[in-house]
Amino acid sequence: IEAIKFYPVPTSDELNIVFSKSLEGICTIQLFDHLGRLVLIKDCLINDHKASISLNELATATYIVKILKNTSIFVYVLH
């Protein structure tokens, strides 16, 4: 299991994502609202095991985060 951590949680601005050492390169991050609607999609560069996305245009809510990297898919719930 790959370890992925998010901070700060909760946040309304920049969400930082820290990946385990085995993940590098480009990943796709998708955010879904509580109804399952895709509200954000972004390709991110994992640099030094970190990436960040801006959430400042989204309402404060619970989101499902889906991270796609090569053939791996990681799903998390952000409150």
Image: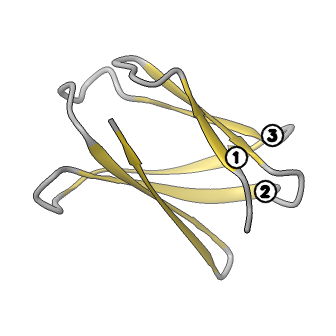
How far from the left and from the top, in percent, is residue 46? 74, 46
Residue furthest to the bottom in view is 71
Please, what is the three-letter code of the amino acid marked with disc 3?
Asn
Q: CA distance from mark 1 to mark 3?
A: 6 Å
Q: Residue at x 39, y 23 (%)?
A: 10
State the count of labels.
3
Please, what is the three-letter code of the amino acid marked with disc 2?
Gly
How far from the left and from the top, in percent, is residue 47? 80, 40
Q: CA distance from mark 3 to mark 2?
A: 7 Å
Q: Residue at x 89, y 51 (%)?
A: 21
The answer to whether residue 71 is above or below residue 55 is below
The answer to whether residue 26 is above or below residue 45 is below
Numbered mark located on residue 24 in the image: none
Numbered mark located on residue 25 in the image: 2
Q: 1 or 53, which lies in front? A: 1
Do the residues bearing badges 1 and 2 touch, measured as CB atoms within 8 Å? yes
First along the sequence among labels 1 and 2: 2
Label 3 sits on residue: 47
Q: Residue at x 61, y 47 (%)?
A: 44
Label 1 sits on residue: 45
Q: CA distance from mark 1 to mark 2?
A: 6 Å
The answer to whether residue 12 is above or below residue 77 is above
Do the residues bearing badges 1 and 3 touch, measured as CB atoms within 8 Å? yes
Do the residues bearing badges 3 and 2 touch, measured as CB atoms within 8 Å? no
Q: Quadrant of residue 27?
A: bottom right
Kindly state the secondary structure of the residue where label 1 is placed: strand
Crowding around mark 1 (Cα neighbors within 10 Å: few <14, some 14 to 19, many 20+) is some
